[in-house]
Image: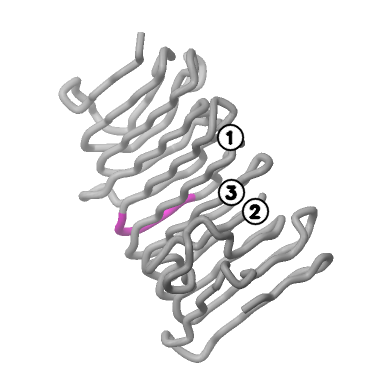
Amino acid sequence: DIVSTTNGNVTISNSGGTGADIFINGAAGGVAADTVNDTVAISSSGAIDDFVGNVETVTDVTAFTIDLDAVEGIGSTADVDLAGTVISAGTTNGNIALSNAATTAVTVTTLTTGTGNIDFSQTGNQDLVLTTVTTTDGNVTINNVGGTDADTTIGTVTADTTDDTVTINTDGALIGTGPVTAKNLALSSLEAGASIGTSGSHFGTSVNGAFNLTTSSGDIFLTDTNALNSSQFTLNTGA
């Protein structure tokens, strides 16, 4: 149940069909490489999941770079608990559910699935950069908590525009210009004075449903590709 190296990469692969699932038992030590410059790469032709019954506060995978690839979901039965700095996760279909305990700024390069929801939660009061987050049919939920240093930079985030919602909550500031594509969009920033977008660089969206936008006391600058009306918006600037 324990796979670890103090200086080196770890690669684990289980192939042969959709029954080739991988369960990671963090309570027994999980999978670990050093957090300075090494990688844990795990691939499955089935699913990758937290071991059934594992305590959610126990870390399953530790490394500087964590790369998870599956066919039938990642963390579908229980969140896979990470401690990483550069994170990517992709599955053909199925949900992605990840929790990351951050000790420094984190970059999520990709979170991608076909039919399935994406749920990424980070603790530790650290910056989070989202480069590409995509589901063709599902909701996206991102949470970055721990304090006002927990800024979140938003790159390209895509859900379907028929009935799905993108929700991004951060205890710090929301940075970046998107774009975010979805039916509905909920953004929340709790840092005092932090805006969503700026006057010179609006936050970009393609949303044809409801907007729920919250700042502690900051302004909101947004440009959408659709024709909008005021009835679509719920705004709370805390002012």
219 vs 105, nearest the viewer: 105
Q: Residues within 10 Å of mark 2 (few under 14, many from 20)?
A: many
The answer to whether 161 appears left or right of 85 in the picture is left
Which of discs 3 and 2 lies nearer the camera? The answer is 3
Q: Residue at x 51, y 49 (%)?
A: 132
Left or right: residue 16 compared with residue 135:
right
Q: Amino acid at mark 2?
A: Gly
Residue type highlighted by circle 3:
Ala
What secondary structure is found at the residue carrying circle 3? strand
Q: Which mark is residue 125?
A: 1
Among numbered discs 3 and 1, the one appearing first in the sequence: 3
Label 3 belongs to which residue? 101
For the residue marked with disc 1, what is the amino acid?
Answer: Asn
Q: Between marks 1 and 2, how big is the CA–CA gap?
A: 14 Å
Of 95 and 59, the residue lying toward us: 59
Q: Secondary structure at mark 2?
A: loop
Numbered disc 1: secondary structure: loop
Q: Which mark is residue 89?
A: none
* Gap between marks 3 and 2 measured at Cα: 7 Å
Give the image location of residue 99, x and y in percent.
50, 53
Q: Which mark is residue 84?
A: 2
> In which quarter of the view is residue 78 placed?
bottom left
Q: Residue furthest right?
A: 7
Q: Is residue 137 magenta?
A: yes
Which quadrant of the figure contains the C terminus?
top left
* Residue bounds of the magenta highlight: 133-138
Q: Is residue 182 above or below residue 10?
A: above
Mark found first going from the N terminus, 3 or 2 = 2
